[in-house]
């Protein structure tokens, strides 16, 4: 009886099939060739979903499925939900391939389900490309594939001001992304201007990590100005950015009205603003704590 139950279970698994939800290949050195292979697999699944023989990704040939494959429940088209490819030596080349694949998956979902239902269709929602080398060009490519993504980690990728500009522009139109990590990317006040501008229009991102960049007081001021119009962001990480008293107090003013000016517009939605590891004096830190309490973390400042 035990063997019979086991056989029945195996038949059930074979008939029903189990889909892979998360693929974690961090620290494997897959490089661009590996990223391209994964992109091709995502695109092939997208073509199956759309039940089309036409290419959904530029530069790829048409696909003809084996007879009866699309009607076989065991091969119901599916797409990963989480793809983790950090620490893999992926450059802009691999980023371009992944961008096209993500777009192909979204297009296929819309073709087969319609725009409304496609929002809940299985597709890559979390993409981790931390600690690769996609650079500004890779960031530009991925900026075109934000639709459908909910979490994107591009920390330590050398995207610079050029790359962050493309991402910030895409955020103005995007409504799906909830978490964006762009720490350690040599972003200066110039790039921060574009990020700040996007915060005044995008009300959907909940967590933004700009830590370990070079935004300084000028960048902090730009963010503070546009934070006043933001109602969606809950967590903002600005650790280790060379921010001094001037920038810290401007951010504080964005969360708490200046004494005597109660009509000034402020942000009441941000609950975590981390400024650890900056250049804020003890005097300014005490002032920040007095006015906004735990909403701003100004502990462990650098001292020279």
Image (tube, grey):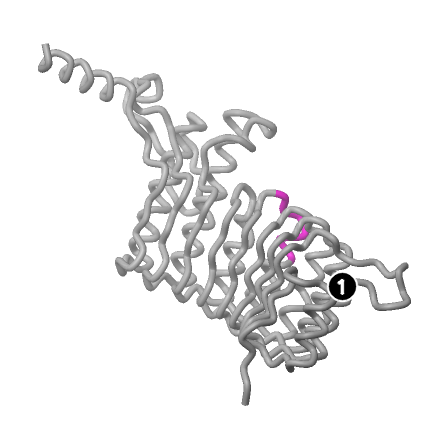
Characterize the local packing of mark 1: few (<14), some (14-19) or many (20 or more) Cα atoms within 10 angstroms: many
Residue visible at 36% across and 61% down in the picture: 90
- The residue located at (52%, 63%) in the rendering is 182
What residue span does the magenta drawing correspond to? 169-175
Q: Which quarter of the picture shows residue 73? A: top left
Asked which quadrant contains residue 27, the reply is bottom left
For numbered disc 1, what is the local secondary structure? helix
Q: Is residue 70 magenta?
A: no
In this rendering, position of residue 58 left or right of residue 243:
left
Q: The N terminus appears in which quarter of the rendering?
A: top left
Which corner quadrant holds the C terminus? bottom right
Percent coordinates x, y for residue 263 in the rendering:
90, 59
Residue for point 68% across, 74% down: 286
Q: What residue sits right under mark 1 in the picture?
A: 254
Question: Left of 58 or right of it: where is 198?
Answer: right
Q: Position of residue 61 (x, y in %)?
A: 37, 40
x and y, in percent, of residue 86 in the image: 37, 58
Farthest residue to the top: give it: 1
What is the x, y in percent for residue 181? 51, 59
Q: Is residue 79 above or below residue 58?
A: above
Q: Is residue 12 left or right of residue 106?
A: left
From the viewer's side, name the closer residue of 224 and 283: 283
**4 or 158, nearer to the observer:** 4
């Amino acid at each position: 009886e035990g063997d019979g139950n086991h056989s029945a279970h195996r038949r059930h698994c074979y008939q029903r099939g189990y889909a892979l939800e998360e693929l974690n290949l961090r620290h494997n050195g897959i490089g661009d060739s590996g990223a391209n292979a994964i992109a091709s697999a995502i695109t092939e699944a997208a073509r199956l979903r759309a039940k089309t023989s036409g290419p959904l990704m530029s530069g790829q040939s048409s696909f003809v499925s084996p007879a009866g494959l699309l009607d076989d429940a065991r091969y119901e088209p599916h797409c990963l939900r989480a793809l983790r490819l950090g620490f893999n030596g992926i450059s802009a080349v691999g980023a371009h391939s992944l961008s096209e694949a993500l777009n192909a998956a979204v297009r296929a979902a819309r073709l087969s389900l319609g725009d409304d239902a496609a929002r809940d269709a299985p597709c890559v929602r979390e993409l981790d490309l931390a600690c690769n080398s996609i650079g500004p060009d890779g960031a530009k490519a991925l900026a075109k594939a934000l639709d459908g993504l909910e979490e994107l980690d591009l920390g330590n990728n050398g995207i610079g001001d050029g790359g962050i500009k493309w991402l910030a522009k895409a955020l103005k139109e995007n409504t799906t992304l909830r978490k964006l990590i762009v720490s350690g990317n040599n972003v200066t006040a110039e790039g921060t201007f574009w990020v700040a501008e996007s915060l005044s229009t995008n009300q959907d991102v909940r967590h933004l990590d700009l830590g370990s960049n070079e935004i300084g007081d000028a960048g902090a001021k730009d963010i503070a100005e546009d934070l006043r119009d933001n109602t969606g962001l809950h967590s903002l990480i600005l650790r280790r950015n060379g921010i001094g008293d001037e920038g810290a107090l401007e951010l504080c003013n964005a969360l708490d009205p200046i004494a005597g000016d109660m009509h000034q517009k402020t942000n009441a939605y941000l609950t975590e603003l981390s400024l650890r590891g900056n250049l804020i004096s003890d005097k300014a830190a005490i002032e920040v704590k007095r006015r906004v309490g735990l909403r701003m973390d100004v502990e462990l400042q650098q001292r020279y």
